[in-house]
Amino acid sequence: MSQPSSTPAADAADAAASAAPPADQQAQAGYRTVGDYRAEKPVMRARNVDVFYGENHAIQSVSLDIGLNEVIALIGPSGCGKSTFLRCLNRMNDTIESARVTGDITLYDEDIYAKQMDVVMLRARVGMVFQKPNPFPKSVYDNVAYGPRIHGLARDRAELDKIVQTSLERAGLWSEVKDRLEEPGTGLSGGQQQRLCIARTIAVSPEVILMDEPCSALDPIATARIEDLIDELKRQYAIVIVTHSMQQAARVSQRTAYFHLGKLIEVGDTDEIFTNPRHKLTEDYITGRFG
Ligand SMILES: Nc1ncnc2c1ncn2[C@@H]1O[C@H](COP(=O)(O)OP(=O)(O)OP(=O)(O)O)[C@@H](O)[C@H]1O
Ligand SMILES: [Mg+2]
């Protein structure tokens, strides 16, 4: 047997520390997240995040890592703060006048709320796909080329063509639109539009992809395509998905975070959360007694 690398006491202290960082502030908020909020390969780290909309304390002392090569599902009843937390991760809350965000959020150890952070660049690095597909009123080609153009990612038209094609291929849409590149993006079906929005997001080579109920406007076939795509994308990216479908969370995610009234109640491996939830509120939600 190999030598233990630390003493049992140190292990216990480590284990306590793993649950501890937000403890002071969480204790003030009157709770403590169950489970380990850290990821194996963290790309983003949120620590002690609070969000207020005026007087409304919408997120309370949430700490959570977003990990590379994994999908984390944010679940919980309507109004519990899933979208609010998601928007903290690429500063979309900046666009809401009453919103105030405190705490620390880093992207590879860079403070995303630092004064010198370029928010346009941040939103390319941490891309977002919304519930309702929202292609620009432009051609299919220009929808995907938009980001690479404003960020100067292509030196010439040939390079831009290549980015557009690769992004559409990776989004599983190329074969359906390769002869319709000059047609308006808004003329595609709902499922195609959502894949177009995903192609637009990945065209700028993001590090993290945030998805807020990306399939809720889609039929089961289009949903299955997006879920396959999410599975494929996680090989390269860190992905956060908000979903009201527990089946979807179970199918696509490796970690699940359960929110309730602005608090992160429990986080852990998706299998564990769905088969063996530790917190009563999580159990009530996943067994359908609440929400
Ligand atoms: N733009 C906003 N201005 C003011 N309050 C807001 C705003 N957006 C959300 N809130 C409030 O913040 C809280 C959390 O809302 P949020 O939209 O994050 O919940 P959610 O979990 O995404 O809900 P749903 O499942 O219905 O999408 C709610 O009390 C909501 O009313
Ligand atoms: Mg929401």
Image (spheres, rainbow, N blue to C red):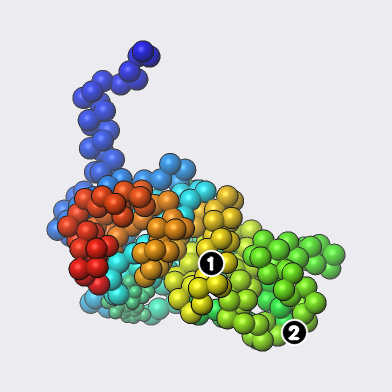
In this picture, is 121 found above or below 5?
below
Q: Position of residue 244 (x, y in %)?
A: 37, 70
Can the viewer see residue 208? no
Name the residue rendered at 73%, 68% in the picture. 174
Name the residue rendered at 59%, 51% in the picture. 236
The tag on residue 183 is 2
Q: Are marks 2 and 1 in contact (CB under 8 Å)?
A: no
C-alpha gap between disc 2 and disc 1: 25 Å
16 relative position to 72: left or right: left
Figure quarter occupied by ligand 2: bottom left
Q: Position of residue 270 (x, y in %)?
A: 36, 52
Q: Secondary structure at mark 1?
A: helix
Name the residue rendered at 17%, 57% in the picture. 280
Query: Which quadrant: the N terminus?
Result: top left
Disc 1 crowd, CA 10 A, few/some/many (<14, 14-19, 20+): some
Q: Amino acid at mark 1?
A: Ala
Q: Position of residue 237 (x, y in %)?
A: 55, 53
Q: Secondary structure at mark 2?
A: loop
Can the viewer see residue 182? yes
155 relative position to 248: left or right: right
Q: Amino acid at mark 2?
A: Glu
Residue 134 is drawn in which quadrant? bottom right
Query: Which quadrant: the C terminus?
Result: bottom left
Disc with the residue nearer the chain's start (2 vs 1) = 2
Residue labelled with disc 1:
224
The tag on residue 163 is none
